[in-house]
Amino acid sequence: MKNRVKRINQLLGLVLLAGLAGTAYEVYQTNKINKVNRALLSGEVVNDEHYPFHKKFADAYQQGKSGNYKHATQGFGQLLEAPKKLQQDDAFEVSAELKSLIQFNIANNLFRSGLQRLVAADGAIQEEAKFDYLQAKASYEQALKLNPTLQAAKFNLSLLLSVIPSNIKTVAQDPSGMEISNLPQGLP
């Protein structure tokens, strides 16, 4: 009987140690996640290599906040293009709601970029601003398609539509960002 009680106590002691080790690990993980969440909420850049998706999101957000709209749009676009590369584990899945928020941020940065280049010297809307507005409109619509309850996207889309003329047309933009008169581009 004594041996049986002794074995049960040893087994319970091992279970207790395993439970304490598991609890310590969970506390460590929770603190690490809370640190990343605090950085994201305060708008700081996340420097934790274990969260590459969140790090890229925070970096793109910070770029937009500092007025570098082109880089912010590119950063958010990369999140949409290659989310699998940036996932920290297989359990992390980019939901439609998160994709909607990414599209919303892309649209916001394009809208702000268009507002920066608003009018030419003669009072007409510049081609770059037209292009940004049309891209922002498409991104807001995509965000609303992914998440129809996103009220901020609805509001911003209505603002955008009130800013741009209804008959706006634009020419396709050169992806390199440079246009050199009539000279052919590329090698002969």
Image (cartoon, rainbow, N blue to C red):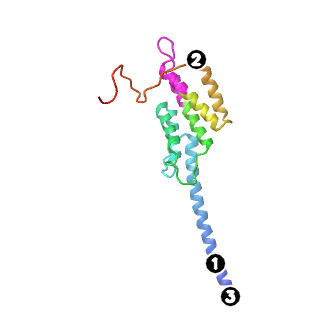
Q: To which residue does mark 3 refer?
A: 2
Alpha-carbon distance for marks 1 and 3?
A: 14 Å
Q: Residue at x 53, y 31 (%)?
A: 109
Q: To which residue does mark 2 refer?
A: 167
Asked whether 110 or 4 is in front, the reply is 110
Would you call the spot at circle 3 few (<14 residues within 10 Å), some (14-19), or many (20 or more)?
A: few
Would you call the spot at circle 1 few (<14 residues within 10 Å), some (14-19), or many (20 or more)?
A: few
In the displayed image of the protein, which residue is found farthest to the top? 122
Does residue 114 appear left or right of residue 160 in this picture?
A: left
Percent position (x, y) of residue 89?
54, 54
- Dot 3 falls on a residue whose secondary structure is helix
Magenta residues, dominant SS class: helix
Quick one: label 3 or label 2, which is nearer the N terminus? 3
Q: How many marks?
A: 3
Percent position (x, y) of residue 92?
57, 51
Is residue 78 found inside the magenta-colored segment of the image?
no
Q: Which numbered mark, 2 or 1, is in the foreground of this view?
A: 2
Alpha-carbon distance for marks 2 and 1?
A: 78 Å
Alpha-carbon distance for marks 3 and 2?
A: 91 Å
Does residue 147 appear left or right of residue 125 in this picture?
A: right
> Which amino acid lies under the numbered mark 2 shown in the image of this protein?
Asn
Do tag 3 and tag 2 residues touch (Cβ < 8 Å)?
no
| Quarter of image, res 103 | top right
Is residue 126 found inside the magenta-colored segment of the image?
yes
Q: Which residues are magenta?
A: 109-134
Would you call the spot at circle 2 few (<14 residues within 10 Å), some (14-19), or many (20 or more)?
A: few
